[in-house]
Image: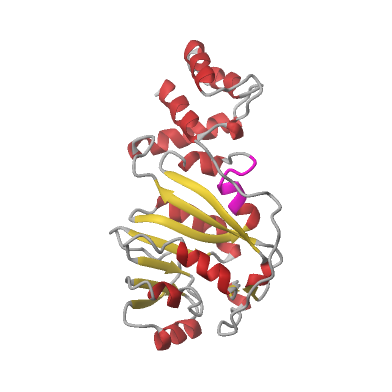
Amino acid sequence: MPRNHPSRHPARPTAARDPRHPGGAHELGQNLLVDSRVIDRVVGLVRDADRPLVEWAAGRGALTLPMARLGRPVEAVEIDPRSVDHLVRIAPGNVTVTRGDILRHTPPSASHDLVCNVPFHLTTPVLRRVVTLGGWRRAVLLTQWEVARKRAAVGGTTLLTAQWWPWYTFRLDRRVPAAAFRPRPSVDAGILVIDRRPQPLLPVTDADRYQRFTAAVFHGPGRGVRDVLARQGLPRGEVRRWARQHHVGPGTLPRDLSAGAWAEAFAIGR
């Protein structure tokens, strides 16, 4: 699958702070977005789809209000009661404010887009929850820079990405400097865009078996992925044919495989 990724070390622009958005509550791990250019970019990533919007960790509304101006229904989910009260006061009629924990909130089953400025200490559970939920078509997530890079397979695929690749695409949109948040975190962030594939590479009924397969390949013994697959009991002739088709050499590692290569390797032993 072709990938277009930005440079690993792009220039870091100075944040254009919007003074209307104060910093977040430190005890809740809130680093609120205050850079108007980043806000515009996040909103732009969900602008063209005519779907309702769900925003997790809405904070003080830096993203909520611009998304509301798109004219679509918005559900803003926030756990901090002070921020909830603020959102209720400022939200227009197409915004529903819900006080709740984003790890327990259940979005609508109908098609929608999901946006979240992910609290950094909740990154892993939020990502795992997002990929297991139905309904949403696009998820736009602000996460730590290194997490965004890894999930988008910049520099190699991680196990988590490989396990969900047949059903989703992962794309790194851009780097976001730490100065774009208040209070300022210790690391930069990145915008990670996850899209649900309209045509999955594998049936969803295969998910459990496929994910066990990818874990076994990532952690299995062998000198390269071809050797690992053969040791997993896949027919060597089929593995050689698969390797030629996907340009997999003797030293190719699991982290080097594309989404299509993973799906077809699984299909050999299915």
In the rendered structure, the answer to whether residue 204 lies left or right of residue 219 reads left
Q: Is residue 153 part of the magenta span, yes or no? A: yes
Quarter residue 21 falls in:
bottom right
Magenta stretch: give its range. Answer: 148-155
What residue do we see at 39% from left, 76% from top?
69
| Residue occupying the point 60% across, 84% down | 19
Residue that extends furthest to the top in the rendered view of this protein: 237
Residue 155 in picture, x, y percent from top left: 65, 41
Q: Position of residue 25 (x, y in %)?
A: 59, 79
Tell me: 85 left or right of 222.
Answer: left
The answer to whether residue 103 is visible is no
- Which of the two residues, 73 or 5, is positioned nearer the viewer here? 5
Between residues 172 and 125, which one lies in front from this camera angle? 172
Which sits in the foreground, 149 or 12?
12
Count of picture labels:
0
Q: Is residue 88 magenta?
A: no
Above or below, 80 relative to 172: below
Percent x, y for residue 242?
49, 19
Res. 133 in view: yes
In the rendered view, how is the structure colored? secondary structure
Location of the C terminus (image quadrant): top left
Residue at position x 42%, y 64% in the image: 104
**55 in relation to 248, above or below:** below
Find residue 230 and report its horizontal and vertical position in percent. 54, 17
Furthest residue in direction bottom, as rendered? 89
Query: Of 44 and 30, which appears nearest the observer?
Result: 44
Image quadrant assignment for residue 94: bottom left
Residue 68 in which image quadrant = bottom left
Side (left or right) of 199 relative to 261: left
In this rendering, the answer to whether 95 lies above or below 107 is below
